[in-house]
Image (cartoon, grey):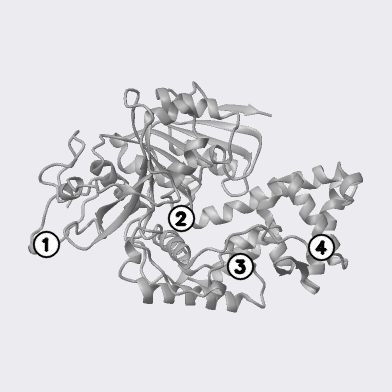
Amino acid sequence: MVLRDGRTISVLTVGAVTTVLTALTPMTAFAASDPLQRYARQQLRWERCDVDHPATFECAKVKVPLDYRDPGGRTIDIAISRVRAGSAEQRHGVLLMNPGGPGGPGLTLPVEMEPLLSAEVRDRFDLIGFDPRGVGQSTPIGCDLPADQRTFQHPYAPGTFAKDVAWARTVADKCWAKAGDVLPHITTRNTARDMDVVRAALGERRISYFGHSYGTYLGAVYTQMFPQRSDRFVLDSALDPSLAWRGMLREAAPGAELAFTRWTEWAAARNATYGLGSTAAEVRRTYWDLVAHADRTPVPTENGTLDGDAIRAGYAAFVHVEAVTRWIVALKAAAAGGPAAPAVPSVVPTDNTTAAVWAVLCGDSRSWPRDPEQYRRDAVRDRAAYPLAGDLGANIQPCAFWKSAAAESATVVNNDVNALIVQNEWDPQATPAMARGMRRALHGARMVTVAGGEGHGVVVAGPSCADGSVTRYLTTGRLPAKDLTCGG
């Protein structure tokens, strides 16, 4: 059959009849002969989401196929939400939203994002949130992983690599034992297909979209699969689609080194205040001496002790130069016998989040090496090149032992759909290099870089110099004439 994104697959449908899917017509729903037509015709039952949010925040469930190759087979639920446009006269359409991840629930995004968007944008769009398939209230999956198996970053060391391999194998085996019937279908491409079913069920010809972090990749995949359905797409802190997925994990290390170097210079200029060293080299030495000390004697914090690898795992904090300096000073004092230092702010992921992360990371791409020695070599090489975080992204992951290779290859994003990419100069996760990769893939896009901007998120972090470009694009559809840099 021909899927709506143009792929041709032979499939057995209900009644053992082979069905050929026709291409989409310019209507809001699917063609009459398309087996997905029944999903477009479903009646959505909108209800108040919960008593903790305003009555105007409504939720519903959308039925979608678990396997789009068998649209008449098993179905799953996609939980969606909305806050209606403020003005019926000015309403332009719907703005779907994704917070990132993968594995991040997005059902509450309409109420969370509403105060971050201008009144002009809120007047023109129904804000639509959704939990991606397998996440939150959208037929969630799990692997029965205890807390100590939900970690994502494993520093490489020759003496612990066998343990890391065992962890990766155990996580993969548990996930497949618990959810093996569903895991092959928890992919970015299928989530993009779900978005298009949601579009049709809402009665919309096209969708606009806001995506953060992983959500930028999901949005780019949608534009590639459904270019005629893509309206105004804002991609906040973009990932390079050509690196999915292992390359994205490893690409954080070069950016971490740049941020670390910038921090050493910042702290050295303020040695009178913080006492970490009067030159960048001295500050660098102070940090690595602290790491070495913590490897010998873990440093007490408010949430337990940190060894050297745990301190390195906080590398993302180095984009926030003032905050991370206070943390390093506190760790240094605690290591010398002072009061316990604050812990690195973190959120332990639920098992659902963990399961969804591995399902997407491992299921989206066939590029994961199967040989543990490849990971060992890469971890050694990346640690030498990027001492702060190189091994954390290169070390072995459960994807090395995922029992089924991806049913589809990772999406090659290469199109002319217009989009607006907004990016901080100092982002520890979606680095400017990654955002430039997204810009190269979306030829019709424009990019606004916030000079000096710190952190993983522009629009989601509150007011910035990029807000005017975002509002103008979402309200008029007009992109800047060229890529811009604002702030300073």
Residue behind mark 2? 102
Instruction: Give me the residue at 69% from left, 67% from top.
Output: 303
How far apart are labels 4 and 2 at the CA level? 33 Å
Mark 1: few/some/many CA within 10 Å (<14, 14-19, 20+) = few
Q: Nearer the viewer, mark 3 or mark 1?
A: 1
Residue 154's label in the rendered image is: 3
Amino acid identity at mark 4: Leu
Q: Would you say residue 444 is visible in this rendering?
A: no
Gap in Å between the C-alphas at discs 3 and 1?
45 Å
Regarding mark 2 in the picture, which secondary structure is present there? loop
Rendered image quadrant of residue 124 = top left
Give the amino acid type for the residue marked by disc 2 in the picture.
Answer: Pro
Q: Quadrant of the C terminus?
A: top right
What separation in Å lies between label 1 and label 4 (alpha carbons)?
Answer: 64 Å
Q: Is residue 156 left or right of residue 459?
A: right
Looking at the rendered structure, which numbered label has been put on residue 460?
none
For label 3, the crowd category at 10 Å Cα-Cα, with few meaning under 14, some 14 to 19 and many 20 or more, is many
Name the amino acid, label 1: Val
Specify whether residue 308 is in view: yes
> Which residue, given by chain and number where applicable, does mark 1 sit on?
14
Tag 1 secondary structure: helix
The image shows residue 6 at horizontal and vertical percentages of 24, 45
> Of the residues tagged 2 and 3, which is closer to the observer?
2
Residue pointed to by mark 4: 290
CB-based contact (under 8 Å), mark 4 and mark 3: no
Q: What's the amino acid at mark 3?
A: His
Q: Earlier in the sequence, mark 1 or mark 4?
A: 1
x then y, percent, for residue 112:
49, 43
Per the model, the C-alpha gap separating discs 2 and 3 is 19 Å
Label located before the other in sequence (2 or 3):
2
